Image (cartoon, rainbow, N blue to C red):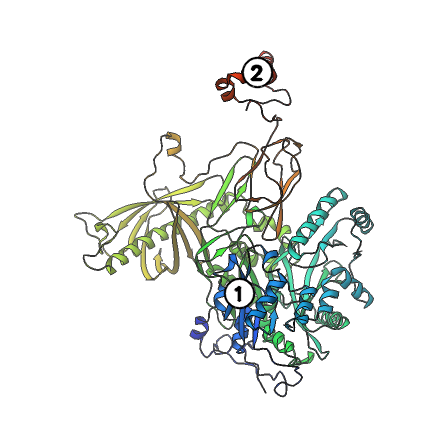
Amino acid sequence: MWFYNSFLYSTLSELQAQAMSSMASVLRRRVQVRILTVQKKAFSSSSGEGSTGKRIEKILIANRGEIACRIIRTAKRLGIRTVAVFSDADRESLHVKSADEAVRIGPPAARLSYLNAPSIIEAARRTGAQAIHPGYGFLSESAAFAQLCEDEALTFIGPPASAIRDMGDKSASKRIMGAAGVPLVPGYHGNEQDIDLMKSEAEKIGYPILIKPTHGGGGKGMRIVQSPIEFVEAFLGAQREAAASFGINTILLEKYITEPRHIEVQIFGDKFGNVLHLNERDCSVQRRHQKIIEEAPAPNVANDFRTHLGQAAVSAAKAVGYYNAGTVEFIVDTISGQFYFMEMNTRLQVEHPVTEMIVGQDLVEWQIRVANGEPLPMNQSQVPLLGHAFEARIYAENVSKGFLPATGILHHYRPVPVSSTVRVETGVEQGDTVSMHYDPMIAKLVVWGENRAAALVKMKNCLSKFQIVSDGSFIGYLWDMINLVAGLPTNINFLQKLAKHWAFENGEVETHFIEHFKDDLFDDPSNLVLANEAYDAAKLSAVLVAACLCEKECCTLKESPTGGKSSLSIWYAYPPFRVHHSARRTMELDWDNEYDSSSSKILALSITFQPDGNYLIETGEENSPDREVKVTHLGNSDFRVEVDGVSSDVSLAVYSKDQTKHFHIWHGSHHHTFRQRIGLQLSTDDEAAHKSSFEVASHSPGTVVAPMAGLVVKVLVKDGAKVEKGQPILVLEAMKMEHVVKAPSSGYVHGLQIAAGQQVSDSSFLFRVQDMKFRRNLPSLTAFFWQPELRLRQFKNAWVPIIDAFIKSRRSGKYYLEEGYSVP
């Protein structure tokens, strides 16, 4: 008999040492008790009972990132050896380092590596792996891959290929559910994909409609269409994105429910026909149709509703002979209270940890046990519901620019310490790169509390302490300028705003939550009260940065060997000594004002070294008090700071790039970023001398640059074409998500030289839109003056009409050019 031992550690310090360990399978106890009490539950009554063939001893994980790390941890706890696979972009990744063995499977592009089934099968053969765990995404819902594993005598740790085929095809699954009596949203689920037919079906359903791929998940390929005018482009875009993400471009249509909740049920089955559900999760808070905060159980749900929902999910699984882990997703109409079958994900979900936290079980272990042929360890009546859990997905993305993904190197990465009630699921570590090739998720923060309110308090606290610093950049475009945001942008601050919002605190969630409360969740530059509060908070942070930097320099000098080489000035002796006065220094820190994105703000600080070791810091602004700061350096990036009679912990991360030092500071619930130029900046422009050294130069009006690094998948117009404001010009793809680049104004496209299939870098020039049409190959002034043979032939054809137009303009007082001409 074997017993289910759920990540047992004897002390909290051991838990913290295992910072990446999964805490899912823990029975919860009083908050005061820190030693874990383990639920011991026999999975089978005798060793190997019900199992067929040899037990799994080595698993290949056909995935990457945090889910690969998650599977590896459970496998190692069970004494099972692991094999990682990696693309060239992931050679040094955490999942590769964590596995017992690792095999290269191809270049960075997913279709050539993580979607390359033959390469993965060959890796399993080479390493002697007996089973393959697909994780989520990539090949996890490929019936062909599951069948290929079976044909190659490899155990696929997941459902049978037949169930994946039936339920993975959303159209087929809806037909099956309809036959089983499960309520369905009105829609078209047929195989015919002719665009005219699809448009006709959309009109029958009635707008607004939802377009989504029949395979895959994660919101990829989903489009909300409000009118027939938008249908064709949305349909074609959904097909392209589906093909890129899942290899299949078939589409289904559904009536779009205007006020829905997204509630899903975790189900599990074994090979003996037993199926149960492990309660529900609410995944309503989404951006770009992708979940960012999930919780279990769903808030404000009656027990009867929960029971009916769970029974419907179990019936759905039994209808296709399902075993292993799966999730049945429902859409709930908040107006009528009705729920409808949406789809079934035939894999482990990204958000599975919240279920683990409320049932005290390790679902990856369940998957492996079921794959070994063992029965489920409990029946439905034995499934507990313990407390409440949240999961917050932390992404590298720019929230203010439509949540576009970002890339960069993680110079400073310090997740919160884990415990029995806090988990951090991640696939990266300090020094890693967030790549453009894959999903930009950095980590998942998972917390548990005895009730929803307690869990929410814990999530807010953990988010405020989650530290990420990178040299990555995101460049977005306005109509007439480029705005550079230094450092890797993340959604942590946005998650904090979500968690603090009154409606979220009350559990009043639905899928349009972010849109409905956008005025509360996004910064309003016109709000002077908030702008002033933000500026005051930034000034305090700047004071703390200056004090901590000085203290660290003093500590470094004290610790340096006598007579040793030190880069610090002798005037920083500790304590500082001056004749008849105290030592002083100045420091300028540049701050990006979130309420004024057009420029940054320089904060000039004067620091006086006090005889008692404290620092008196002045900002030089009226109505801005001088502050005396006491600092204790605790080691590395940690400090204890006392200012204005308040003592608190401060963390400071520093890195240098491109003649610039970057400072990130965390204290309380605040996180600020500052910059400082290294070396002397010379300028002959008097006006420029008064500007921030980080102020970004403007491009000419109408210039559009790439909002992110990516692949051009489609160019919709030709260079020189006349376009209207907001008209789609081209489509970029990055991290398996499409982004449509539109015309910033009405006019003529100029300089559009890129083609489909071409890679573009972040901030690279794409095209320009001007209100005059440009003629190609118009002779330049240089050619006119330095190539005499061109003068007579081209002057008459090209320049004379322009000069004539100019003369007419002067006479009439109006300046214009005849269409088709412009000075190069």
> Does dot 2 land on a helix, a strand or a loop?
helix
Quadrant of the snapshot with the C terminus = top right
Which sits in the foreground, 246 or 260? 246
Q: Which amino acid lies under the numbered mark 2 shown in the image of this protein?
A: Phe
From the viewer's perspective, is residue 217 above or below residue 201? below
Residue beneath the point at 46% across and 36% down: 697
- Distance from disc 2 to disc 1, alpha carbons, whole Å, reads 65 Å
> Any mark on residue 795, and which?
2
Q: Is residue 571 left or right of residue 316?
A: left
Q: Nearer the viewer, residue 261 or 123?
A: 123
Classed neighbour count for the residue bearing mark 2: other residues with Cα under 10 Å, few (<14), some (14–19), many (≥20): few
The residue that label 1 is drawn on is 103
Looking at the image, residue 270 sits to the left or right of residue 481; the answer is right
Above or below residue 332? Residue 766 is above
Quadrant hosting residue 119: bottom right
- Secondary structure at numbered mark 1: strand
- Point out which mark residue 585 bears: none
Q: Nearer the viewer, residue 767 or 265?
A: 767
Residue at 63% x, 23% y: name it. 820
Taking 324 as reference, is 198 left or right? right
